[in-house]
Structure formats: C-alpha cells, structure tokens
Image: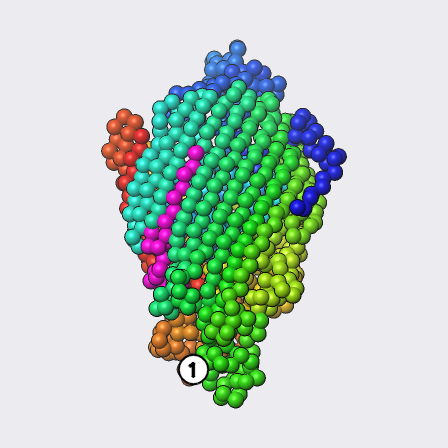
Amino acid sequence: MKRIRIPLGAFALSFSLVAGHPFLMAQSGTAAALSGTVTDATGAVLQEATVTLTYMASGAQRVTHSGLEGAFLFLQLTAGDYRITVESSGFAPKEQPITYQGTPIHLSIVMATASAQTEITVNATNNDPTEPTHVDITPQQIDRMPTESVSSPFSSLITMTTPGAAADSNGSFHPLGDHAEASFVVDGQPITDQQSRTFSTQVSLNALQSVEVRQGAPGADVGDKTSMVIVAQTRSGLDQRRPHGAITLERSTFATSTWSANVGFGTARFGSFTAIDALNSGRFLDTPEVVPLHADGNAENFIERLDFKATDKTSFQLNGSLSRSWFQTPNTYDQNALGQNQRQTVVSFNVAPQMLHTVNSHAFNQANTWVRQDKIRYRPSDEIYSDTPAYLQQARRLTNAGLRDEFNYNRGRHNAIAGVEFKHTFLAEQFAAGVTDPAFNSPCLNADGSPSSNTSITDPSDCAAAGLTPNSAFLPGLLDIDLTRGGTIYAFQGSTDIKQVALFGQDFIKFGDFTANLGLRYDKYNGLARNHGIQPRVGLVYGATPLHTNFHLNYSRVFITPYNESLIIASSSGPGSVSEGLGATDSAVLNTGHRNQFNVGFESSLKRFSLSGEYLWKFTYGAYDFDVLLNSPLTFPTQFRKSKIDGGLVRLTLNPTHGVNGFFTISHVRSRLFGPEIGGISFTAPYSNVARPDHDEGLAMNLNLRYQFGRRGPWVNSSYRYDGGLVSVATPDIATVLQLTGDEQQQMGLHCGSTFATVSAPLRSCSGSISATRIRIPPPGTENDDRNPPRIAVRNTFDLSIGEDNLIHHENQSLGIRAEVVNLNNTKALYNFLSTFSGTHFLTTRAVTVGLRYGF
C-alpha cells in the first residue's frame, strides 16, 4: 500500500483558511444563488433590512437581514420565479419579481422614502470579473435542446452549446484541442474520470437544474483535467409544499423508447427530489456503418437528492445515484457476417453527502464527501473465431472516494476561496486478447498490396519463397497471441490504488476598474508514478464600465495526471509485461505532466445580447492521448513528449426579446503532438516528430434560435452545427487507402471516377481520378502530418424541436406534446475513421422523436 505524506504545516494552513480567516468565494460549483446589497439613495448601506424571498410556485418564504455592509445571501434555490421584498425602517418597502435559472444573480437594491421611486437592478453574471469565460446552460435549454446521442445526452448538450467542443462519437467530445481533459463538478463533487458512455455513466439531464461550462483560465479551486470544467447543479425539493414533477414518454427512430419521471416535494427545511429514467434503443452507440448492425442497448438511472436545513445557517444534502447500462458493440458488415456478438455492461453508483454552513452574509463554508464506482465488463462472442480481428475480454472497476472542504468569502475589495481536497482511487483490471484474423498481422502482402491470409508463414523472410512480399507493418510481438498461427490467448489481472491531495487558495482583489486574480494550488499525486506540483493561477481584469465589458489576461500552471481507465495495463513495461505479451511497439509507466496556459479575452453584457471572446495557448509537457487496441472499442492511455494547442472562441448570446432568444458560437482550435511517446502502451506506428492528433478540428460553429409563443404557448427550437472535420490519421495518402478492406473503403466513400468501392469489391488501383466523399485525402505529395493532414469531410447538420407544454391545462396539472428531428437534412457523415482513439463511427442519420409529457 502506497503512502502519501503531507507536511503538518500544510494541514495547519489549510485549516486556518477553511475554519475562520475572512479571506475567501465560490468557484467550484457552490450554490451561491442569490446575493445583493441594500443602500439608500445616497449609496449608504442599510443594515438590518429585512429581505424576504418568496418562491411563487409554492408560496414558501425565506427571510434574512442585510449585514454590516448592507449585504445579504440566499443559497440552494430551486430554479423558477421568485418575489423579493425588502423592508427597512424609515423607507418604503420594495417588491420585485426575479427569475432564477440556476446561475448566480447579484442584486443592487436602492431604497427610498415613500414619496420617491426605488429600483432593483440585476447585474449580469457573465460580466463578473471573478468568472472565467463560460457558457450558462439554462433549464429551458436542458429540456428542449435536441440530443444527437441517445446514450450520452449530457455530452451532446455541451457540444451543441459550447465553442471549442469538438464532437466525437458515442457522446464524447474533445475540449479545446485536448482529448477528454474535462472535469465535471456536480453539486461541489469533482469528477475527473471520463464520462462518455463506454467508460462510465453520465449525470442524467432529468436531474439537472443548471449547467455552467467554463472554458477560460482555470481557477485554483480546480485541478488536473481543466481544459473544460462543467459545473452542474441538481434539482431540489426544498420549498415545494406539494409534489411537483413530470412523467415523459418518447418514441424515436431506430426502435428507441424513453421513459422518465421526476418528482420534488418538501418544506422550507426538508426536501426530496427523485428522478428515474430508462432507455432502450436499436442504435444505442454510434455505428461503423450507416445502417446500425448489432447496436441494441438499454440504460436505467435512479437519482435521489435529499435536503435538510438543520438551522437557518446550516444545511445538509445527500446525493445518491444508481445506474446500469447494457449494450452491444456495433458491427461492421464483415463482423456481422461472422456473427460477432461483443457486449458491454456498465454499473455505476454514487453516494455524496454535503454540508453547507453560512457564516454571515459575506461568507459560507461547504464540505463534500463521496464514494463513486464504475464497474465495466466487456464480453466477447461465445465462439472465439466469431470475433474479428481479435478475441477480446475486459473487466475494470474504478472506485473513487474523497472529501473536499472550501471556504468562500466576499467582502469589500476581496472575493476569495480556499480549501483542501483529497481523493483515493482504487483500480482493478482483468484483460484477455487473441488475434483471430489471419490478415490482421500477416507477415506478407499479396501482389495487390493487401495482407495475405497464409497462416503457414510466420516470418517476413519466408514471403518471397511463396511469391509474396514482406509486410513492413508486421509486428512480430503479436505472433504469441495470433490464434491463427498457433498462438494462445493472453490473460492479465492487476490492481492498484492512487492517492491525490490538493490545497488551494485564490483571491480576486478589486482596485478601481482593475481586478487582480491571485491564486495558488498545490497537488500531490501518489500512484504508479509519484510527483507533486505548485501551480500559480494569476490574472488581471480591466472593467470598461462605459462599454459594459471586461478584458482579462491570465496565466495558469496546471499539474496533470494520467487517465485512470486501463492505466495498469498501459503502464506495464519490460520482460514479461502486458505490452510485451500483446506485441506493443512501445510502453512505459505513465508519469504526471504539467502545462503552461495563457488566456486573453473579453466579456461584454448589453441589454439585448452578451458577447464573449477568448484566445488561448496551452503548452503541455507530458501530454496524454489514447491508443486503440486492434481496431476494437478497447482503448489505453498513452503519453507524448509535449503538445501545443492554441485557439480562438467567440459566443454571442441573444437575451430573451419578444419571445426570441438564442446563441451563436464559432471556434478554431489547433492541436499538435510532438513525439516520441514517453509513456503508456502503443499498438500503432509512432507519430511523426510533430503531428495533428485525431482530436484536432479547425472551424466549428453552433447556431441556435428559440421562439416562445406567449408565456405558456407553443415553442420552437432550431439548431445548426458546422464541423470542419477531425484529423483522419489512418488515411495519409491514396496508396494507404488502396490497401484497406472493401468494407473500410465503402465506409469512407472511396471511388475511382464513378465507380465506388463496395464490401465485396475493394479498389486496388485507379487510373483516373480517385477520392473519398467522407474523407479529405491530401493530393499526392502534399500530405503533411502537421500542416496538411487528412481530415474527415466538412459536415453541416440541422436539428429541430417543437412542443406545446400546456396542450391541456387544469389547475396544477398539464399535458404536453413535443417532437424533434435530429439531422434534419439527413447528412451521411463520419465522426471519425479508424481513429487511434475510437475506430470508425457515423453520425446518426435522420431520427424523429415524438413524446408526451404529463406535468403536475
């Protein structure tokens, strides 16, 4: 058992910051819902003003009093309509309606005598100098945005609303040029492990109240996977004096059925929120063919949140969830002909208690603890040789336990946070593999350049005698597990544990129109590798008040750690190791890395719209990626010497105007990896000294427009997405493409003149013009892994959803109907092709969903 040591002085410092020093403000997902100040007409603060907040749906009220500087604070609010009432002796009372959508609101309340007017102004949260560039996803968007991934709607929501999120298959997305360097923070609980469907189970949209996606410079409160930080707040039953919820039934193309229900109820002190959903689909995962083959799957989720306000200042929260999914690995035509029947199950649970204590109107403390587990089992076909190109079996268990305590403070010129975080991760892995396709790793090539299926030859030197050509891509290490050439199945089992601790502190100090951001974070990692890192996070914000705009400049040092998925196998090296047994071209223990990141940008908030822009540079030493095993769904982490990423992001948000609102995003991100590989396990040829990985995408755009007829009338939601195309590493030139199988060639739409490749008739030569409809292959002699790599073809997709939530309305009950169409223009396009991370996958072709919703 490995031990992690922390200096006693560090604990003492952390305790002094967390327990009492008035120094510190919410960054990592604390529900700092509604705050404000009360002043008179001259600007003098009013103390002891009574502030009453009424939840209109139930009439529940919360009461507080303004403090020494006229400040007040309400935490843990449910999204919806409120009325705020302010009363102070000698002044006329003031009432104002407020709509809370899950993101923080700050109010400036000016009180006057009974003969004068009073006003309340709401400061736009996206113009807060303490916030990085971010996207606020509202409850309306969570509910009404069409989803392009039935199995991972949360990831799809982020991709369709956030600039710099490159869409990948099976609900994955590449944040700002990185592979999976994203963190989720759910009600203060940090989750840095991968959350796509094939690795884990995402938080259900059915349980979410709001989402904030942070793309700017990371604050000191977040570490490790910081390219994109997704902060989610779940729904609560507090203040709901009668049960309130909905039941939804939906039916979609590909025999997809969805059922979901949620209900919240409670008093001012106790609340319960429950969400249940179930899904069954004939296209659960994205498929390697346009037509889904062997693609059935189902998923079930149960989420429960309990709230208890022990006193007016102290509350407790308990989040619990249990999820299970079963799904088939989609087949190619070749695999389907052999009867391949590979399946996977994912079982996840999470238990996360929280305590929130309000010290006063300026400060509060939040403590989170949790235990989370993902249990993955990948099952092969019953018949070994039904699986191609390999027999594969895997079982993984990832258990993460942790605690986090943070203290937030906002007073005068200071807006600060400090805290401590500890995580302990337990990993267990089982794995078995054997090559079943004689052509997959053949020592020889046929005269047309295709791999030979002659199993009697095991050495390239014997090819000439058989009239064949030696295969330069042959991996001799795979002979021991090549079942077609006398090899045996390789089996592995291992376990380990990883400890991580972090201390952090950050203060935003205001000096006139300038705000200085001073942050420091310390991380210590004790896993298969051991290391630590001190990370300054500093910046400067200038507030141009006449322009309603903030300009910022930031520098961040980030300590990064390896992916936990398949980490034990990927870190093996030396004689008798997994890498040697699997014939990997290279392997080494994955170490920690570090990043220097620079951000410059602006955030502007006007009456009708808000505009934000960001440019970023990321220089990473010890950058991580993934390598796929034998063109299968099983992937393993790998590490490169360094990477360079830069990119620009712009988002224009139209505030609700006469029933119309929406947004437009545009981004351009460049990602470059520099060899050699220094860690992990690799089954493919080494990258060039510098190359674009298959998560590099140039131009990408999102456009969304929504219209609401009246307050409760029908609504229309339309979305457009442009994707410039991920890099297609496996198709550098025509010569390489001509050696692919007929199935692979037809997937990419390869054609010589008007003759297209088919599964049974591949193209092996072409005397005329040759190209592919779904991949851009550089002309002969022009391919460059860095400056002119092959890419997936540009694609444009349109989505549309319409609904009427009050088709029938009686008292507190309603019946609604809705319909949505994903990929309305029916574009037949690829996410990726023979990707080193995930293989080949197509976008969903046109899919129609209709549903009924009963609200109560």
Which residue appears farthest toward the top when viewing the image? 90
Task: Using the image as rendered, state which of residue 482 and residue 553 is in the foreground.
Answer: 482
Instruction: Give the quarter of the image for residue 296.
Output: bottom left
Residue 213 in the image: above or below residue 307: below
Residue 15 % position (x, y): 69, 30
The part of the image, by quadrant, that contains residue 403 is: top right
Query: Residue at position x 45%, y 42% from top?
Result: 203
Residue 592: percent from the left, percent from the top?
66, 52
**Residue in view at x 35 percent, y 68 percent:** 337
Q: Amino acid at mark 1?
A: Ser
Q: How many numbered markers are drawn?
A: 1
Q: Is residue 645 left or right of residue 148?
A: right
Question: Which image quadrant for residue 673?
Answer: bottom right
Q: Which residue is mark 1?
A: 765
Q: Nearer the viewer, residue 356 or 53?
A: 356
Image spot of residue 846 (x, y percent): 32, 56
Above or below, 87 against 700 in this view is above
- Considering only vertical position in the picture, is 178 above or below 333? above
Q: What segment is highlighted magenta in the picture?
A: 281-304
Q: Quadrant of the C terminus?
A: top left
Secondary structure mostly seen in the magenta stretch? loop
- Given residues 310 and 609, the one toward you in this image is 310
Residue 510 visible in the shown view: no
- Asked which secondary structure carries label 1, the reply is loop
Rendered position, 309 above or below 687: above
Q: Is residue 637 magenta?
A: no
> At 42% across and 77% down in the image, what residue appears?
770
